[in-house]
Amino acid sequence: MGIIIIEDNLVFRDYVCDMLENEGYTTRTAYDCVSAHKLLATLEEEDIVLSDLRLPDGECTVLLEYMRASGMMNPFIVMTDYAQVASAVCSMRLGAEDYIPKKLLQEKLLLRIRELVDKAEAKHKIFIFERKGTAFQEINHRISLVAPTDIGVLILGENGTGKEHVAEKIHAQSTRQKGPFVAIDCGMLTRELAASELFGYEKGAFTGAITGKKGCMAEADGGTLFLDEVGNLPAEVQQKLLRALQTKCYRPTGCTRERKADVRIVAATNENLEKAVEEGRFRRDLYHRLKEFVIKIPPLRECREDILPLAEFFRELANEELGRHTEGFDKEAEKELMRRMWAGNVRELKQTVRSAVLLTEGRLIGADKLEAESTAQAGSSLLLKDGNEERERIVRALAQADGNREVTAGLLGISRTTLYNKMKEYGIMQKKSEK
């Protein structure tokens, strides 16, 4: 872990360097904005920046603004002798992690840096977990093929299957890995604010816009922009997004000139976009632009070999987060985990395990500590209008259930009668020995 220290007081700078190096951190130093710019050009993804507020040639907020505009999202801590509220507010608005008076530095700095390091390590730990099931071996292969390119990727899957996780892996294996990864949930954007959130706005662009704001497109410049639930974008924003993809230019709300953005788009959805196109809710040209390469994530109930390894991983994370000391699941708990349909997919599994860890007093988690199963219908979004995909999923479920139709119907979240009718409709035949 490296820390860049920007401080013009040489004695104080050496004092801070010694404090940090004694804790095992490596340090690099600059004394003004000009020399700091040279150091920032060599900034590593995990580095932390610690800067005096007032430097000989300006305030450090100029450096912070430059970093964010350049896609450098590294933690930035401001230190100063001057307890000025306005400067503190300005630095925090620009994205500083903290604002520490120098007289409290010894008391607060190491603790704050440790928190930032733990946060980064926890995010990395979640990221590096690899599912080993057959489906994810194919997904990882497809990620390795498309990641080094700039091809648009559309990730399909139910809620909670880990679409953002796959998008992060694409970014991490791409040539843009040192650039920012910016994620936005399009389902949370209102029609009025969607364009402003994506493309930003100028000061005075609308009532309440007392300052300008950079949108996600500017934040992701040089990196990857992940558009989750992209099917929810309003029609007018779809048009603007298409133009930005085609020209690599966009115009913030209230701005009279265009700005450039070198951004790779990775989109995701849990709905059938082809149907949305047919119904006129989604632009056909944007749909084809986004789906240059498709990655489908199957629901957790179709990847049952992943359930226990994921549960163990989430148990260890929950131990660390909650200060518990569980060592595993008992046999009944494992059976219960494997029995469930996990309508909420990986997200539901993680929440269930986390709650069970909190409730468990002993070494092993029992089945009684697993919260009630989601009442959502596991198959509600599994069987789609797309016949080819529906048939493929039925065949896959039959294979996982070794041909047992009752188990297959359970996996799909439908009745046995519906399964029989679907098998007849799609001409799915079984051997006589299969039930």
Image (tube, rainbow, N blue to C red):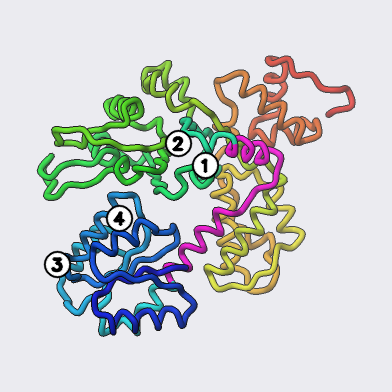
| Magenta highlight range | 115-144
Q: Which residue is mark 2?
A: 266
Which residue in the protein does label 4 denote? 67
Task: Kindly report the distance in space between the C-alpha atoms of the residues bearing marks 3 and 4.
Answer: 20 Å
Task: Give the mark, 2 or 1, whose residue is nearer the N terminus.
Answer: 1
Crowd class of label 4 (few under 14; some 14 to 19; many from 20; radius 10 Å): some
Q: Which residue is mark 1?
A: 170
Tell whether 368 sits left or right of 262.
right
Q: Residue at x 21, y 37 (%)?
A: 252
Query: Is there CB contact under 8 Å for labels 2 and 4?
Result: no
Mark 1 crowd level (few <14, some 14–19, many ≥20, 10 Å Cα): many
Disc 3 residue type? Answer: Ala
Mark 2 or mark 4, earlier in chain? 4
Q: Are marks 2 and 1 in contact (CB under 8 Å)?
A: yes
Is the residue under label 3 in contact with that under label 1 (CB below 8 Å)?
no
Of the residues shown, which amino acid type is indicated by label 1? Ile
Distance from disc 1 to disc 4, alpha carbons, whole Å, reads 23 Å
For this view, does 31 lie left or right of residue 324? left
Ranked by sequence position, the earlier of labels 3 and 4 is 4
Q: CA distance from mark 2 to mark 4?
A: 23 Å
Label located before the other in sequence (2 or 3): 3
Residue at image mark 3: 86
